[in-house]
Image: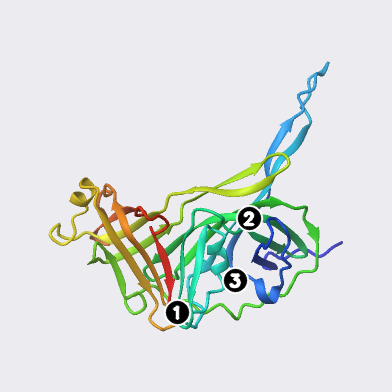
Amino acid sequence: MADSIKWRHQLLLAKIEASYATDPTLTGSNNAILAKNIELRPMEGEDVSRDLLQAFLSAQATVPAGLHVVISFDTELAGSGAAGTAPAWGVLAIGCGCAETISEDTSVTYSPVSDDEESLYFKYWLGGICHAFAGARGTGVLTISAQGIPTIRWTFTGLFIDPADVTRATGTFTAYQKPLIASKAHTPQFKINDVALTMRSFAFNLGCQVERRLLVPDEKIVIVDRAESIDATVEVTALATFNPFSLAKAQTRVPVTITHGITAGNIVTVNAPTSQVRRPDPATNSQGVAERVIRLTPLSTDSGNDQFSIVLT
């Protein structure tokens, strides 16, 4: 009898495709993703009933159609360890409709694009079973919560490829840096409308609308739209300090910024310079202290593609 496959024997690789849906040759040494909470839906699609005329009562045979793969997983939010060097997870941001701009020895910036988005090729192993999927594009949610490890939750959709028994690659993860807990010491800045607020949690959703276009003869995964959003849980303050009601009523656009990390090479700053304040949620009780979720919508200017940036310095 064959040995059981242990759940911990998982490995994920990802690489930008030079040609859409074509294997760019992934290696464990260069393309391993240090991930957790991996959820693979390996054969999504529809079962099309044949609806044959039968002279008896029976279920109908079906034909699988629209096959695709969906994967979700978390990566830790940290820099590369060197200013001006892209983080190992940067390839994933590129696969979510972001451009990567590198300023040597200074910074790496991820900002939205509206055309010619890159696609990714993935390989995921569970034991010796390899699930490859091509032409993938996705979206992500960046979360920073007090006293927790900041993460990005990624979700990618790709074209289905038959799984196969393949010897699992060996992943190299030295490019990944140790994360820092979100805290007073490590998260020096959080502001809405240039007002420093006491924050419990911050979530920035890339909001990419990913669609599968499985037509004849062209099959592809596309990002057709995006609608970023920010949810921040903060302590309620006097309205003289921060008045979300008046800001929401006036449809005011305000800057939002959060910085995590204090050492060059491991500082991440999320900027959303023109975010519309939405109607605030009711206040809630947390440990006897009033808190409220502030929801914002990052909006672009007339120039476009400037509604947010993720900057690593």
Disc 2 to disc 3: CB gap under 8 Å: no
Q: Residue at x 73, y 41 (%)?
A: 217
For the question of whether residue 286 can be seen, the reply is no
- Between the residue at mark 1 and the residue at mark 2, the CA separation in whole angstroms equals 28 Å
The number of numbered badges drawn on the structure is 3
Closest to the camera, between mark 1 and mark 2, is 2
Q: Amino acid at mark 1?
A: Asn
**Contact flag, marks 1 and 2 (Cβ < 8 Å):** no
Q: Is residue 288 visible?
A: yes
Q: Which residue is mark 2?
A: 136
Residue with the most extreme left position: 240
Which comes sooner in the sequence, label 1 or label 2?
A: 2
The residue singled out by tag 1 in the image is 266
Left or right: 19, with 146 as reference point: right
Q: Position of residue 159 (x, y in %)?
A: 69, 51
x then y, percent, for residue 115: 53, 53
* Relative side of 155 to 122, left or right: left
Which residue is situated farthest in the front direction here?
303
Callout 3 amino acid: Leu
Counting from the top left corner in percent of width and height, residue 77 is at 48, 70
Q: How packed is label 2: few (under 14 Cα within 10 Å), some, or many (20 or more)?
A: many
Residue 251 placed where, x, y %?
A: 24, 48
Tag 2: amino acid: Ala
The answer to which of 117 and 28 lies nearer the viewer is 117
For disc 3, the marked residue is 34
Contact between labelled residues 1 and 3, with CB atoms less than 8 Å apart: no
Q: Earlier in the sequence, mark 2 or mark 3?
A: 3
- Gap in angstroms between the C-alphas marked 3 and 1: 17 Å
> What kind of element bears circle 3?
loop
The furthest residue to the right: 1
